[in-house]
Every structure is written in C-alpha cells, then in structure tokens.
Image: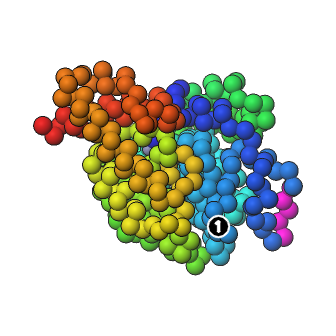
C-alpha cells in the first residue's frame, strides 16, 4: 500500500480502530518486569506463536519475532505511528534489535524514523532510493494525520497525542536519513533472532520492484508484505514497478514456502493461510480476463475504472478498486 495523504487506509484504519485492550492475556510477561493488567494499546497485538506477534492495521501489518533476548520487527506503519509502534512492540518483546521493511511504500516504512538512529533497518536494495526520494510523502502523511486527530476517540488521542505533536514539531528537520535503511539485502538474505532463522526472499517485481517476503521456517510463518491484500483491493503502483504478471509469479513462489498449516501475515487484511495466496492469484487472473474483455469491447480506461466486477465487489478499501482496474488496463495495453 502506498500512503495517500488524507485518504484511504491510513485515515479509515486509524479512526476505525478501537483500543486493543482485549487479547492482552495472550502477551508474555517478561520475567521480573512490571506489567499493568489494564495496559491500553493502540494496536491489536495478535499472538501467532510463542515467539511471534502481529500488529494489524494503521498502515501495513507489522510482525514481531522474539527469541533469546533479541527481537525483529517487520514494517513500521505510517510515520505518525512509528513511536507508539516501538513502545508497544518493546512492551511485548523487549528491545527491538532489527527492523525489516517489506518494500518502500510509506505505510510500511513511515515509522522508520523511530528506529534508524539506534536499530539496524534493512530493506531490499531497490527500496532504498525510493525511500530516500519520498520524504515529501512522509511529511504530508504527518500533516494530514495530525488533522485527523480531531476525529479519533479521546482514548486514542491520549495514546498518540504527544507523539503526533513531537513529530509535527520535527517536520522541518526530518530528512531522508531518518527513514532510509541502514543496510540492504538481495534475494536469500538470512537474519538470526536469537536461535530463530529468518529468511528474506525477493522473487522479482510484483507489488513493487523491491518486495521482500519474510519467511521463518521454524515457526512455519510468512509475512508477504503487500504481495497479499487479504480481501482488500490490491494497490497496483506501476510507478513503483508493479506488474500483475510478476506479482502472480511471486505469489506462486511464496506458496512453495507454505503448507496447510503455515500462518500467513498479509500486508493488509487479517492473518490467514496458504489459501489466501491462491485467492490473490485468482483475483488477478479473473480481473485481467475481465479487463481484457472490456478492452475488446472498446471501453476506455476510465470506463473500466468505474466498474465493480463480481465476485470482488465486496472487498475492502473501495478507493483502491479504480486504481487496481486502471493498473491492469494499462499493463494489458502495454503488451499489444
Ligand atoms: Zn505497498
């Protein structure tokens, strides 16, 4: 997902979220650490395994893996949530020692500023120049989020108001280096978290030209980044290198990493399993077929962008639907 200031997932995600006080019983208590019973958290921290938790929504889904006193965080959501994401993640697992970004989009890298000074932040090589080039996008995200504060609940405001204000005050001094990775990787890079091996795979251009899939074989766990929008219209960012042909090819490779029990954390939408990867492939198969039919009938790109084809007419985040259809239309047109 790309952060679009003032619209879409960012705004609705934040305003639509209740406080995630429920489910805290599933969180581990660190030995000797005081943990208040009624800690209120902004994110819903979903326990996936004794060593893994997902924080759903408010930008891309994040994942935390913890073992042997080390912790790794995948994706940092939108800029205004960087600080609270770090506080809440470290409240769950202790100090975060490594951050991974699954791709450059601002709702997956915006919170990097809360980590880059003292934590290793890793992205695929091709993500780095794109992150460095989109500082304006991070800044406009901060601006619009501060305005959105007036529409959120009092309890939500209380949790994030100080962060928002501090970040807003820092806007004049934020630079590319505050968001840029401290290291990059290509396909097949491995990172250790305590005794847990985490493998980063890049299968070529798909959702962007810098997608990384995070595979944790010993936990049978995969974070797909935005290669999977779980029943959410997929954002096709052609300027960012998106190709639905490559996207499907990458998803087939991800499926090879999975079995029936694999826990799959998508970029957007709820935690799911292997079948959801196949659903995403089918979505593109059927939509490409649909759009090709419309092109044959002489429909323009904008005619097609207004359509709401079944059986996907009930997917979430309607504002992305037209972007997806336009993207497919353009890609099919290119092949001629
Ligand atoms: Zn994305």
Residue placed farthest to the left in the image?
A: 336
Q: Position of residue 167 (x, y in %)?
A: 62, 37
> In screen coordinates, is 72 left or right of 249?
right
Was residue 320 drawn as part of the magenta stretch in this picture? no
Q: Which span is picked out in magenta? A: 32-36
Q: Quadrant of ligand 1?
A: top left
Depicted 307 relative to depicted 179: above or below: above
Q: Is mark 1 within 8 Å of ligand 1?
A: no
Residue placed farthest to the bottom in the image?
A: 195
Q: Position of residue 218 (x, y in %)?
A: 54, 75
Camera-side residue of 265 and 106: 265
> In screen coordinates, is 8 left or right of 24?
left
* Residue at x 23%, y 32% (from the top left corner): 293
Q: Which residue is mark 1?
A: 49
Q: Position of residue 65 (x, y in %)?
A: 60, 65
> In screen coordinates, is 105 left or right of 238?
right
* Residue at x 38%, y 44% (from the top left corner): 283
Residue placed farthest to the front in the image?
A: 311
* Residue at x 57%, y 28% (from the top left corner): 143
Q: Main secondary structure of the magenta part?
A: loop
Camera-side residue of 273 and 28: 273
Depicted 231 relative to depicted 65: above or below: above
* Residue at x 63%, y 73% (from the top left corner): 67
Question: Residue 309 lies in what quarter of the image?
Answer: top left
Q: Position of residue 144 (x, y in %)?
A: 57, 27
Q: Tell me which colouring the rendered structure shows.
A: rainbow
Residue 129 shows up from this direction: no
SS at badge 1: strand
- Mark 1: give few (<14), some (14-19) or many (20+) Cα within 10 Å: some
Camera-side residue of 251 and 62: 251
């Amino acid at each position: 997902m790309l952060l679009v200031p003032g619209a879409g997932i960012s705004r609705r995600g934040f305003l639509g979220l209740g406080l995630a006080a429920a489910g805290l019983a599933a969180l581990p208590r660190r030995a000797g650490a005081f943990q208040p019973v009624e800690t209120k958290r902004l994110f819903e921290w979903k326990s996936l395994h004794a060593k893994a938790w997902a924080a759903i929504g408010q930008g891309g889904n994040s994942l935390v893996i913890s073992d042997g006193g080390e912790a790794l965080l995948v994706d940092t959501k939108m800029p205004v949530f960087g600080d609270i994401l770090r506080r809440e993640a470290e409240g769950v697992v202790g100090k975060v020692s490594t951050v991974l970004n699954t791709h450059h989009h601002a709702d997956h890298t915006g919170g990097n500023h809360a980590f880059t000074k003292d934590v290793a932040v890793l992205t695929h090589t091709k993500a780095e120049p794109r992150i460095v080039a989109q500082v304006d996008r991070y800044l406009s995200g901060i601006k619009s989020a501060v305005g959105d504060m007036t529409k959120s609940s009092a309890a939500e405001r209380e949790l994030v108001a100080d962060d928002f204000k501090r970040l807003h005050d820092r806007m004049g001094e934020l630079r590319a280096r505050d968001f840029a990775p401290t290291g990059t990787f290509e396909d097949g890079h491995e990172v250790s978290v305590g005794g847990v091996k985490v493998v980063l795979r890049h299968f070529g251009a798909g959702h962007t030209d810098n997608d990384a899939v995070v595979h944790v074989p010993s936990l049978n766990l995969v974070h797909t980044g935005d290669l999977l929008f779980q029943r959410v219209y997929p954002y096709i960012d052609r300027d960012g290198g998106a190709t639905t042909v490559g996207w499907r090819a990458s998803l087939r490779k991800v499926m090879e990493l999975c079995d029936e029990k694999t826990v799959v954390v998508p970029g957007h939408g709820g935690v799911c399993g292997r079948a959801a990867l196949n659903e995403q492939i089918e979505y593109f198969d059927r939509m490409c077929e649909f759009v090709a039919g419309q092109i044959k009938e002489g429909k323009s790109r904008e005619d097609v962008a207004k359509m709401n084809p079944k059986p996907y007419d009930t997917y979430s985040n309607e504002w992305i639907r037209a972007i997806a259809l336009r993207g497919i239309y353009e890609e099919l047109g290119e092949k001629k």
